[in-house]
Image (cartoon, rainbow, N blue to C red):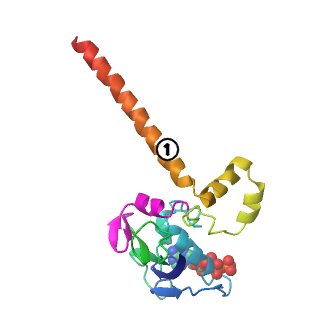
Amino acid sequence: MHLKRLEVQGFKSFAEKIVLEFNSGITAVVGPNGSGKSNISDAIRWVLGEQSAKTLRGGKMEDVIFAGTEHRKPLGFAEVSLCFDNTDRTLPIDYSEVIVTRRVYRSGESEYKINKTNCRLKDITELFLDTGIGKDGYSIIGQGRVDEILSTKSEERRHIFEEASGIMKYKIKKQEAEKKLEMTSQNLLRINDIILELE
Ligand code: ATP
């Protein structure tokens, strides 16, 4: 699996639609200060489900939408699509090309899509579990992250290894199952109370 293409429209400084093709090998994005290099990695984080405006270097989520310039009006929505080559079926979906899309309007309304079909954020998160891709994945190492990784507590560092070794998926499924079990136990307790009241 590899990243093939990034399409950005109305996101931060990119008012016009831009398309970045990633060929095999290394791609370097270069440009003067403030030209939008970091906005590209922000766009990748955002489409993968980042919910923290602070991580995206803004104050609120609306700040990701092109805010306008002297010569151009602000836009009403931001949309980012990320396209992966999935011929090796690393992503558990039966398509050779997988495109994830996120769109947000100024009203705060959000849309997520996998291969042009509406989906939930949870579907996108699950799709990339254990691949190293994802908003918290190790495939995006931001400025200062290397120091952070080296200096954090060993339990926090463990998360990175868990994701790389492919057990994160099972940990999350286990947590979900435990939550369901807890809810079922609570329901059983309530039913027992009702039965006692009726007897
Ligand atoms: P540096 O090399 O200094 O780190 P950079 O190339 O990484 O810079 P970015 O931080 O990606 O640059 O881009 C910053 C630019 O994006 C600023 O000019 C800022 O005004 C612009 N920008 C950020 N959010 C928006 C927005 N919502 N609408 C319009 N422009 C925006």
Position of 153 with respect to 80 (left or right) is: right
Magenta part of the chain: 107-130
Instruction: Name the image quarter holding residue 188.
Output: top left
Position of 132 with respect to 95 (left or right) is: right
Q: In this rendering, does residue 152 appear at all? A: yes
**Residue beneath disc 1:** 174
- Looking at this view, is 170 or 9 the one in front? 170
Instruction: Name the image quarter holding residue 139.
Output: bottom right
Position of 159 with respect to 68 (left or right) is: right
Q: Amino acid at mark 1?
A: Lys
How far across and how far down the image is residue 136, in percent? 58, 61
Name the element at disc 1: helix
Q: Residue at x 31, y 19 (%)?
A: 192
Q: In this rendering, does residue 13 appear at all? A: no
- Looking at this view, is 177 or 6 the one in front? 177
* Mark count: 1
128 in magenta = yes
111 in magenta = yes
